[in-house]
Amino acid sequence: MEFLAQYHPAWLFGLALALLATGIIAGVMAGLLGVGGGIVIVPVLYHLFTLLDIDPAVRMHLAVGTSLATIIPTSIVSARSHHRRGAMDIELLRTLAPAVLAGAVIGGLFGSLLEGAVLSAIFALVALAVAANMAMRSEGTTLAATLPTRGLQRLLGAGIGSVSAVMGIGGGTLGVPILSAFNYPIRRAVGTASALGVIIGVPGALGFLIAGLGLPDRPPGSIGYINLVGFALIVPLTMKTAPLGAKLAHRINPRWLRLAFAGFLALTAARMFFDLLGSSS
């Protein structure tokens, strides 16, 4: 409580509203684009922890760990919504799941041991690459006419799981553009990738939880690198709004939203690079 006492109640109220708004946006994005919400949650938490003057050594770890925990229930709701609409490829999911799980275990353990600056740099670089893909790749542009062999699918799954766990994001951020690059239908890509968030979130969150146990300089209400206050404020709204996003995914052309989202990711990456340059000077 001493930690919170230094902040004005109105400021804390604004902070809570920001977390609630994050939950709404992340839920809609999770359902609409299959991104699991983490690509929104991580940068928001990172900047909120910066405003709270949380130690830079643990700031990004807290953002990633908390995001991974929120992804689990959000992805369950989003995946169920897509499955009810027949947009989930169960056979492909069975092929990808073991490799994604193995990658997420490795990524969760590896990411929790990285320095905060390295973790931020990885997130910024991948976010920038995803933004460029969303904004610049023409509709219908593919690498191949069909999905690759199962062996290569598993290799791609391991890469999706490991990088996503390090970044604190669901499988859709990388999974959807990768599947789309192999001429896979976008709505089935979104639906199938939404289920990968659960597979990534559980081992990833556990890795960050264990790695942060007993460490100093974490905000109140934290277990390991998972902040329960952020989790409690974000999750209920992501679970409520994920079905809305899934519903919109089957009714609208998401091209304009992808462009806006790409702009958001580019600005987030630029801000993180700016913070990294400022801290190193």
Image (cartoon, rainbow, N blue to C red):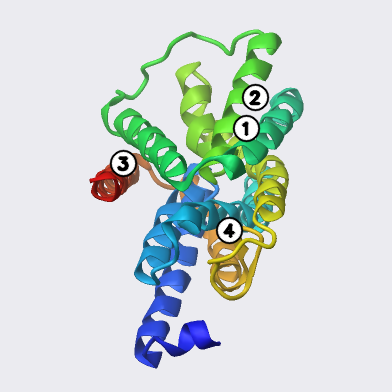
* Location of mark 4 (residue): 66
The amino acid beneath tag 1 is Gly
Q: Residue at x 54, y 31 (%)?
A: 175
Q: What is the spatial separation of the Cα atoms under label 3 and label 4, in whole angstroms?
A: 23 Å
* Location of mark 2 (residue): 158
Q: Residues within 10 Å of mark 3 (few under 14, many from 20)?
A: many
The amino acid beneath tag 4 is Thr
* Location of mark 1 (residue): 161
Q: Do labels 1 and 2 touch, CB within 8 Å?
A: yes
Q: Nearer the viewer, mark 3 or mark 4?
A: 4
Q: Which mark is residue 90?
A: none
- The secondary element bearing badge 3 is classed as helix
Q: Can you give x and y, in whole percent of width and height, for residue 20 in the image?
A: 47, 72
Q: What is the spatial separation of the Cα atoms under label 1 and label 4, in whole angstroms?
A: 17 Å
The amino acid beneath tag 3 is Ala
* Location of mark 3 (residue): 262
Earlier-in-chain disc, 2 versus 4: 4
Q: Residue at x 40, y 91 (%)?
A: 9
Q: Do labels 2 and 3 touch, CB within 8 Å?
A: no
- The secondary element bearing badge 2 is classed as helix
Looking at the rendered structure, the number of numbered marks drawn on it comes to: 4
Q: Nearer the viewer, mark 2 or mark 4?
A: 4
Q: Do labels 2 and 4 touch, CB within 8 Å?
A: no
